[in-house]
Image (cartoon, rainbow, N blue to C red):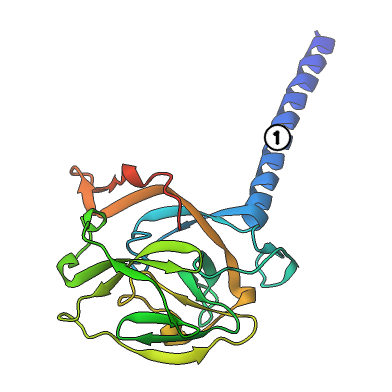
Amino acid sequence: MTQKYHVKSHVKKGIIREYVEAIVVAVLIALCLRSFVIEAFKIPSGSMIPTLKIGDHIFVNKFIYGLRIPYTKIRFFQFRTPKRGEVIVFIFPNDNSKDYIKRVVGTPGDTLEMKQGTLFINGEPVSKVVQAERAILKDIENQEALNLYKETTGQTTHYTLYYTPSYKEPEDFGPITIPPNKLFVMGDNRDNSSDSRAWRFVPMENIKGKALFVWLSLNTEHTFSFLRLPTIRWKRFGKIIR
């Protein structure tokens, strides 16, 4: 009987050890993926409407621009730098405890200027076409005061929002030239975005990654039943971020 007991005890210890090892390996893999490859972020504000809405949960590719030491700004291997038009997540230059998400509109050496609501890059106006179809704005507050456009920034065509001139006069800025190792970023909700127009440039070392797609979207403005649970925007699942 004693021998059988020891055999069972060893078997149990072996099974427990296997489970612990499997959990440790899984945790290490998850940490490596989060640190170097992909990370989840939640959109807390409306500065990127209509591309991204409040309550969108997105995945960010942290590998595309290179590898950095976790919890630092030290990048020990770089594949490439962000291109004009890409949506990036970065450490806010004025507060390193915060992460921001914006669209890159200017890269080092570019000269930017905004005149009467039109963005100029190196003296050329960015293509901007007003959109008559506004279904994308159906749950956007104060949409009657907004004009919806399609703009082409770099190789990327995307939506932008501006207040109508009758609601708010367009603000000019620039011209301004972007220094080396810096980026100029803007929100797609152009008149409701705190971005490089206010606090200037994003250092390259602050960049965390490129936005990929929406994996969950919760609408906290509309709740479900008496439990006050947010509704789910099913149609936004899998939306590629451009």
Picture layout, residue 2 above or below residue 170: above
Q: Residue furthest front?
A: 124
Circle 1 — which element? helix
Picture layout, residue 8 above or below residue 187: above
Q: Quadrant of the N terminus?
A: top right
Residue 8 position in % (x across, y down)? 76, 16
Residue 237 position in % (x across, y down)? 39, 44
Residue 149 position in % (x across, y down)? 30, 66
Residue 108 position in % (x across, y down)? 60, 81
Locate residue 48 relative to residue 154 in the image: left or right.
left
Locate residue 126 relative to residue 92 in the image: left or right.
left
Q: Residues within 10 Å of mark 1 (few under 14, many from 20)?
A: few
Disc 1 marks which residue?
22
Is residue 206 in view?
Answer: yes
Picture layout, residue 81 above or below residue 36: below
The part of the image, by quadrant, that contains residue 195 is: bottom left
Q: Quadrant of the C terminus?
A: bottom left
Is residue 101 in view?
Answer: no
Picture layout, residue 200 above or below residue 39: below
Which one is nearer the viewer's eye here, 193 or 29?
Answer: 193
Q: Residue at x 57, y 68 (%)?
A: 83
Q: Residue at x 21, y 51 (%)?
A: 222
Which one is nearer the viewer's eye here, 40 or 196?
Answer: 196
Which one is nearer the viewer's eye here, 173 or 116?
Answer: 116
Count the marks: how many? 1
The part of the image, by quadrant, that contains residue 159 is: bottom left
Q: Residue at x 74, y 29 (%)?
A: 18
Q: Residue furthest right?
A: 3
- Under mark 1, the amino acid is Ala
